[in-house]
């Protein structure tokens, strides 16, 4: 097995794979990005086309280990892409898809043509798409769709990119030469290097790979809760597994969070910057950290907003929790399970906050280590109860 570190859809990823694993199998089986389809598995049909360092490439005949340090974009990573959005609308309008199996690869290749071609030349479009086979449409609608997008963009004075933005000759990915010290760092190493800096400006903004939204209520006025959030040490004491490494400042905090996932123990050390807006009772905490033992790295962002309830006597706390995780720990999470875990963690945090604000001693000390193993057991137990409740009663566990 070989550990491969790279960027996939703007997210740092590090996963072990066999040297013979294709990039297509790597993203489908390892990352659950099944929008990349497998057809011929010989590099002929184009269904598996992805972007490798911005250049269309056949992922079925590309070894994943050859992509270490590369930037991979699958069809899922183009959801917010302007050109792809226009192409999807054009494909629908021109009836350019039927079964849809070839469409992800077709869109990736068509996007490259829209960026490169100076005008909507039918012959050049057909040649450019000749490596993407479709058994349903006859290609007429596909060509019309690509033509319409090129015409519309040129009419808006959007000029083509010379060679589609390519700056170096050679096959897809050849521009990311890793020889010497000037080559790009693997994703996890780059993230770790960033977390070593202590300058406030070194904690960058980022686009989270996963965002979870949570909400809870507290029987305290918004002003009191907001003042509590200004007490960084007090808030940290309410979070399971969190400890501070140095006295916090109003804008910055340095600390660690200890996590145990089965046999894996990790201690993420890093720093965060704190932003607050008293006018709207809102704020943001954005941080970065690494765990040397598991070779994992993370970026995290917590946005919060406080809303008055019961005439201002209580507060609704709205949380948006975003994170990007790479390394060993990135391999164990499933979205549904992570949401359940986050919900339980937030519930524990809310209970600790309430006790802190009420001035009462908590029933038990905040856990010195965040144990996902015990939380997973609770989640699985709850899911089994719901499942058997539906089987035997036809309802969600109701009698």
Image (cartoon, rainbow, N blue to C red):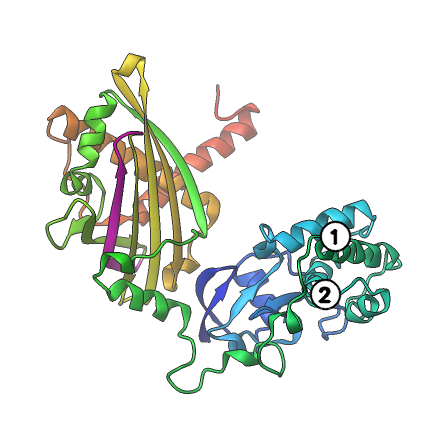
Q: Quadrant of residue 274?
A: top left
Residue 19 visible in the picture: no
Residue in view at x 42 percent, y 76 percent: 184
In this picture, is 114 found above or below 340?
below
Residue 80, image x, y percentages: 58, 50
Residue 54 visible in the picture: yes
Residue in view at x 32 percent, y 67 percent: 295
Residue 370, image x, y percentages: 25, 48
What residue did someone put label 1 on? 152
Please tell me whether residue 349 belongs to the stretch shown in magenta.
no
Would residue 330 be found to the left or right of residue 147 on screen? left
Closer to the camera, 361 or 326?
Answer: 326
In this picture, is 271 found above or below 126?
above
Please tell me whether residue 266 belongs to the stretch shown in magenta.
yes
- Mark 2 Cα-neighbour bin, 10 Å: few <14, some 14–19, many ≥20: many
- Mark 1 Cα-neighbour bin, 10 Å: few <14, some 14–19, many ≥20: few
Residue 45, image x, y percentages: 77, 69
In this picture, is 153 found above or below 44?
above
First in sequence, mark 2 or 1: give its number.
Answer: 2
Magenta stretch, main secondary structure class = strand
Closer to the camera, 353 or 293?
Answer: 353
Would residue 366 be found to the left or right of residue 5 on screen? left
Would residue 233 be found to the left or right of residue 170 on screen? left
What residue did someone put label 2 on? 113
Q: Quadrant of residue 118?
A: bottom right
Provide the residue span drawn in magenta: 263-280
Closer to the camera, 108 or 343?
Answer: 108
Residue in view at x 80 percent, y 58 percent: 147
């Amino acid at each position: 097995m070989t550990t491969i570190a790279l960027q996939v859809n703007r997210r740092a990823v590090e996963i072990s794979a066999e040297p013979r694993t294709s990039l297509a199998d790597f993203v489908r089986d390892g990352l659950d990005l099944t929008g990349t389809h497998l057809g011929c598995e010989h590099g002929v049909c184009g269904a598996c086309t992805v972007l490798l360092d911005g250049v269309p490439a056949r992922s079925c005949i590309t070894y994943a280990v050859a992509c270490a340090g590369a930037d991979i974009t699958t069809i899922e990573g183009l959801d917010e892409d302007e050109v792809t959005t226009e192409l999807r609308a054009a494909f629908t309008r021109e009836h350019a898809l039927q079964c849809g199996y070839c469409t992800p690869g077709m869109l990736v290749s068509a996007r490259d043509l829209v960026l490169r071609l100076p005008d909507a030349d039918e012959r050049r479009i057909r040649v450019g798409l000749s490596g993407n086979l479709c058994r349903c449409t006859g290609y007429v609608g596909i060509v019309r769709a690509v033509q319409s997008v090129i015409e519309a963009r040129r009419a808006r004075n959007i000029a083509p990119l010379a060679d589609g933005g390519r700056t170096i000759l050679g096959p897809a990915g050849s521009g990311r030469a890793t020889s010497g010290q000037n080559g790009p760092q693997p994703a996890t190493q780059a993230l770790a290097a960033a977390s070593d800096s202590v300058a406030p400006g070194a904690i960058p903004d980022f686009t989270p790979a996963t965002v979870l939204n949570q909400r809870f209520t507290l029987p305290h006025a918004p002003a009191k809760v907001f003042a509590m959030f200004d007490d960084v040490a007090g808030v940290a004491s309410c979070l399971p597994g969190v400890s501070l490494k140095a006295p916090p400042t109003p804008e910055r905090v340095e600390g660690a969070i200890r996590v145990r996932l089965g046999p894996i123990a990790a201690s993420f050390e890093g720093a965060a910057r704190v932003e607050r807006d008293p006018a709207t009772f809102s704020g943001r905490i954005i941080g970065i950290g690494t765990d040397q033992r598991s070779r994992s790295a993370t970026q995290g962002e917590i946005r919060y907003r406080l809303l008055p309830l019961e005439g201002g006597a209580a507060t609704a706390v709205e949380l948006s929790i975003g994170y990007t995780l790479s390394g060993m720990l990135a391999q164990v999470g499933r979205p549904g399970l992570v949401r359940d875990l986050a919900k339980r963690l937030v519930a524990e945090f809310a209970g600790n906050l309430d006790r802190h604000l009420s001035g009462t001693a908590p029933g038990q000390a905040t856990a010195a280590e965040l144990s996902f193993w015990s939380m997973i057991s609770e989640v699985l137990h709850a899911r089994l109860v719901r499942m058997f409740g539906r089987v035997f009663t036809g309802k969600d566990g109701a009698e």
